[in-house]
């Protein structure tokens, strides 16, 4: 039951969140209208793409089409489950333990367990609303294209809410356990890191051994059978399987199975939510105290000597003022586990995919399927670059905090400060994209022309994604944020995500015109001579990349100058 203190606390949070919408001036109205128009346009585009994909897979293959579609939906919800869970771990760390108001609230007479419950609600909302916005058009397109009954839509949407609550509550529980029993103890932190690394490697080895017969010799001409037989994401105890089965049974008109999986999702959400509340009432107070401790796993010398030694090589490579910014960025990233944990997981999954890419076989050396797989690799690596830029580049400006005035008034200058961050993040994305792109193309022995085009596209993506994230991160700056998770859960992050994905989709469409119109065995100049319309496509592609790279940083820098004033 809610008490009067809870209602007052919730009202304060509501007023704090809604204060930016209270100013009914022209600027706020235009921003709000543009935000909703952008979300609506993205919904429409996502709806059309998913609708055509579902129709093509479901109706083109008579027997295995529904099975393949079910596997794709199940695997998509598995990816969403992992992303939401990891996102809630980071959001819970920021909301439960690193909020600026938490020390004052913790020392007040307000009950700790009730404070924890409200902060958990805030964590679930901040970590899940963006994922819900992206899933809604997919669910609507799936039901409409497959001619589902009217009760499909409310059932699946409520089931989606239960699914997000399960993933979020698991993330909160993981963060609560880490803060209570691991953070603040050097030995336990070292052992916990080793156990996590060991379990992750064991899972990869286990999946490799279990799926060796499937992934050992994959013929690309039978890829639909391989997808139909892939059961990695279809274990009956996983919430993503319950969600995919709820969608399948609801659109096929099977109310008994729909009630079963709806009940599993609802009871699972109820169980994990109450488990999080129960353990939080027992652990949260001690966990918060331990989370304020700072420990070192290794003995270090004096800080001024360490700084002097580690910054020497930076001064050899970069100007002094830029080297200071680079040094700060590197060490802020290294000491915050919430920053590097997600990058490690993403890169490990990509390396796992690369290890199995060599198992694909082709009947002909110049098979069109090889170009299709190379095209898919570019999409995968571009999506990874976009994910990393949104996760790390976008909050980079806001993480300067309320002390941003010190940067603005220093001798470094806003331009040098901004573009030093810009080039540092671009180089990181460039190393990841080109490094993995070269390895994948060498494994597949891709046609030289397509190899050059794909690497050039990844090169442009590195700067394009950084431009959108850094520019919009400056436009939607949030210097009062308590952490990166607080910044990435704001409405500005959703706008940046949608714009970045639209830029990515347009670039992939233009790249597909270049990749699948080319002639095997000819160089790039001969390609343009044989297909004159490729010159127009290439020009449009380069124009889009030029505008995407140049315009957002200029807008963001202008906004920073206004903020500095």
Image: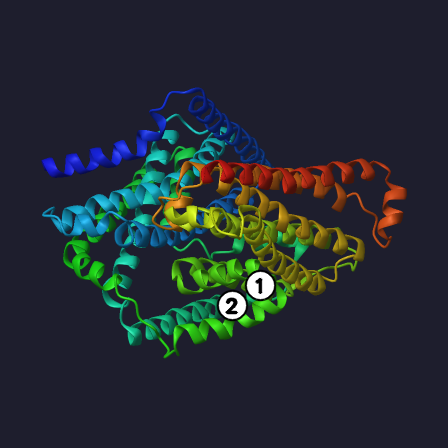
- In the depicted structure, whether residue 223 falls above or below residue 43: below
User: What's the residue at 49%, 43% (across, down)?
Assistant: 473
- Disc ID at residue 208: 2
Identify the element where label 1 is drawn: helix
Residue 204 percent coordinates (x, y): 48, 67
Residue 243 percent coordinates (x, y): 38, 44
Q: Is residue 193 left or right of residue 543?
A: left
- In the depicted structure, whether residue 325 falls above or below residue 26: below
User: What's the residue at 68%, 41% (across, down)?
Assistant: 545
User: What's the residue at 40%, 39% (across, down)?
Assistant: 490
Mark 2: few, some, or many residues within 10 Å (few <14, many ≥20)? some
Asked if marks 2 and 1 touch (Cβ < 8 Å), the reply is yes
Count of all numbered marks drawn on residues in the image: 2
Q: Is residue 410 left or right of residue 219?
A: left
Mark 1: few, some, or many residues within 10 Å (few <14, many ≥20)? some
- Disc ID at residue 533: none
Mark 2 to mark 1 CA distance (whole Å) = 8 Å
Residue 441 percent coordinates (x, y): 70, 60
Residue 506 percent coordinates (x, y): 64, 37
Identify the element where label 2 is drawn: helix
- Disc ID at residue 215: 1
Indicate the colouring scheme.
rainbow
Rendered-image quadrant of the N terminus: top left
Q: Is residue 252 visible?
A: no
Mark closer to the chain start, 2 or 1: 2
């Amino acid at each position: 039951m809610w008490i009067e203190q809870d209602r007052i606390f919730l009202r304060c949070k509501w007023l704090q969140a809604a204060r930016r919408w209270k100013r009914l001036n022209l600027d706020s109205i235009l921003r709000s209208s543009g935000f909703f128009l952008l979300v609506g346009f993205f919904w429409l585009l996502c709806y059309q793409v998913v609708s055509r994909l579902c129709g093509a897979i479901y109706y083109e293959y008579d027997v295995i089409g529904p099975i393949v579609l079910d596997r794709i939906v199940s695997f998509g919800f598995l990816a969403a489950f992992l992303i939401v869970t990891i996102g809630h771990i980071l959001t819970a760390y920021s909301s439960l333990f690193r909020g600026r108001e938490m020390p004052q609230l913790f020392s007040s007479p307000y009950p700790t367990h009730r404070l924890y419950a409200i902060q958990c609600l805030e964590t679930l909302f901040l970590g899940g609303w963006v994922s819900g916005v992206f899933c809604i058009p997919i669910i609507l397109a799936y039901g409409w294209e497959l001619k589902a009954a009217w009760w499909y839509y409310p059932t699946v949407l409520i089931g989606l809410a239960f699914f997000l609550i399960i993933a979020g509550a698991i993330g909160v529980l993981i963060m609560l356990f880490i803060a209570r029993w691991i953070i603040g103890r050097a030995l336990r932190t070292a052992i916990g890191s080793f156990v996590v690394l060991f379990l992750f490697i064991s899972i990869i080895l286990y999946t490799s051994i279990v799926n060796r017969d499937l992934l050992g010799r994959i013929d690309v001409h039978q890829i639909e059978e391989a997808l139909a037989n892939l059961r990695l994401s279809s274990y009956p105890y996983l919430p993503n399987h319950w969600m995919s089965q709820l969608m399948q049974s609801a659109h096929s008109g099977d109310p008994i199975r729909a009630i079963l999986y709806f009940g599993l999702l609802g009871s699972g959400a109820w169980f994990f939510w109450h488990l999080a509340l129960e353990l939080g009432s027992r652990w949260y107070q001690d966990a918060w105290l331990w989370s304020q401790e700072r420990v070192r796993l290794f003995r270090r010398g004096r800080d001024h000597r360490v700084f002097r030694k580690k910054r020497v090589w930076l001064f050899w490579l970069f100007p002094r003022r830029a080297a200071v910014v680079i040094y700060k960025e590197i060490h802020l990233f290294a000491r915050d586990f919430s920053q590097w944990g997600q990058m490690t997981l993403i890169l490990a999954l990509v390396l796992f995919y690369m290890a199995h890419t060599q198992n694909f076989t082709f009947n002909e050396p110049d098979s069109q399927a090889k170009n299709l797989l190379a095209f898919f690799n570019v999409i995968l690596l571009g999506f990874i670059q976009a994910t990393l830029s949104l996760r790390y580049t976008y909050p980079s400006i806001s993480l300067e905090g309320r002390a941003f005035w010190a940067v603005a008034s220093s001798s470094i200058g806003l331009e040098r400060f901004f573009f030093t961050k810009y080039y540092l993040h671009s180089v990181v994305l460039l190393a990841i994209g080109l490094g993995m792109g070269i390895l994948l193309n060498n494994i597949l022995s891709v046609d030289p022309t397509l190899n050059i085009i794909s690497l050039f596209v990844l090169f442009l993506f590195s700067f394009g994604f950084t431009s959108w994230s850094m520019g919009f991160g400056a436009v939607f700056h949030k210097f009062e944020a308590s952490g990166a998770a607080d910044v990435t859960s704001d409405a500005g992050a959703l706008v940046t995500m949608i714009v970045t994905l639209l830029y990515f989709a347009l670039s992939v469409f233009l790249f597909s015109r270049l990749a699948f119109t080319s002639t095997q065995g000819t160089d790039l100049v001969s390609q343009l001579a044989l297909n004159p319309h490729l010159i127009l496509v290439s020009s449009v592609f380069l124009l889009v990349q030029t505008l995407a790279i140049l315009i957002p940083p200029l807008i963001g820098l202008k906004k920073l100058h206004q903020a500095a004033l």
